[in-house]
Image: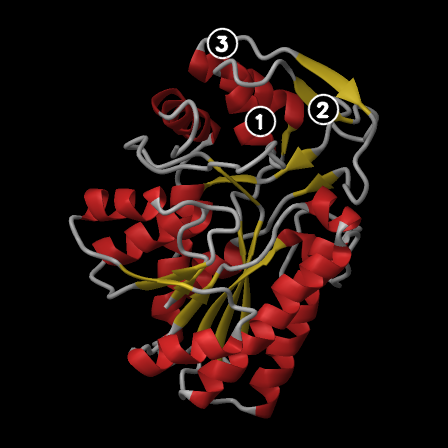
Amino acid sequence: MVTGGSGFIGTHTCLELINAGVNVSIIDNFSNSVGESLERIERLSGKKVSFYEVDIRNKNSLQEVFKASDFSAVIHFAGLKAVGESVSYPVRYYQNNVLGTLNLLDVMSQYNVRKLVFSSSATVYGDPETLPIKEFFPRSATNPYGQSKLMVEHILEDLAKADPEWKIACLRYFNPVGAHSSGMIGEDPQDIPNNLMPYISQVAVGKREKLSIFGNDYPTVDGTGVRDYIHVTDLAKGHLAALNYLYSEQAESFSPFNLGRGQGISVLQLVNAFEKASGRKIPYEVVNRRPGDIAACYADAQRAKQLLGWKAHLGVEDMCKDAWRWQEMNPTGYK
């Protein structure tokens, strides 16, 4: 079962799972996605996908899905994910991300499904004292989105301690970008993009006038924020590796993993790389810092390499090239 499987990371992960021979069912409420993404998964894979239009905050609907199916594991993406929006609407984030997960865990227990890959985030590290970030660094949050992910992590840790039958892989990803190399699936923000790469893409294709860069006075290489960008295809393969790990003898009850490239890239560096990949100029303006943002964040991903046998292979050029191919082929997204 993949919750939130019609979203950006969900679609790419479902495609990797299906291509690896895994039987996949998807639930989603289309709050930030559209049904066309599922049709594209089916076209790319040549397989029919089971789908249930369900909101994970509705426990009765979740129970109906589990009753009708025979799942052995869950990959849990469903949740809201915009830092800035979470600062404005914190209650909405706690309802979706925390209450929704509690419902899911309750129903999983009811139907004796105790393998879970959880979509967490590097935001649980707050503003780290040192870089690169390792899995056992202190955790904190600088915004409600990060706080909601951290709350769920604490819940999962407590659950794993109480019942060691649970096998939980907690994947803390850094900044997923790019698109499938076919150009058929990619990131399709429903409104103004909250993330950098789709905004750059929309400027390049002429949908947006210019890019806003939130602050150029950070203590970084060029004053703009530094992040660890990872190609969404690499990230999707990380979920397959985590799922395989949960079925192995060495799987622990709760296992956190960083999924990133371990390399920091600034906003301006990413803009320059995208200009090269697309052949388009990206006009931008510098505006005030965004609430809840930090200066720099990048991963130490050695634990994932050692225990999952996973590492990122695709570089910044691939990320920009594939993101541009998706945008050029789908100038208005899936619509």
Please name the residue that numbered disc 2 is placed on: 213
- Gap in Å between the C-alphas at discs 1 and 2? 11 Å
**SS for tag 2?**
strand
* Kind of residue at disc 2: Ile
**Residue found at x 79% / y 52%:** 142
Q: Callout 1: 10 Å neighbours few (<14), some, many (20+)?
A: some
Looking at the rendered image, the disc whose residue lies closer to the viewer, 1 or 2, is 1
Tag 3: amino acid: Arg
Camera-near label (3 vs 1) is: 1
Q: Quadrant of the N terminus?
A: bottom left
Most extreme residue toward the left, as rendered?
Answer: 46
Q: Nearer the viewer, residue 301 or 5?
A: 5
Q: Which label sits on residue 199? A: 1
Q: Residues within 10 Å of mark 3 (few under 14, many from 20)?
A: some
Residue 188 position in % (x across, y down): 47, 36
Q: Nearer the viewer, residue 130 or 183?
A: 183
For residue 274, above or below residue 251: above
Q: Residue at x 65, y 62 (%)?
A: 149
User: Which residue is label 3 attached to?
Assistant: 280
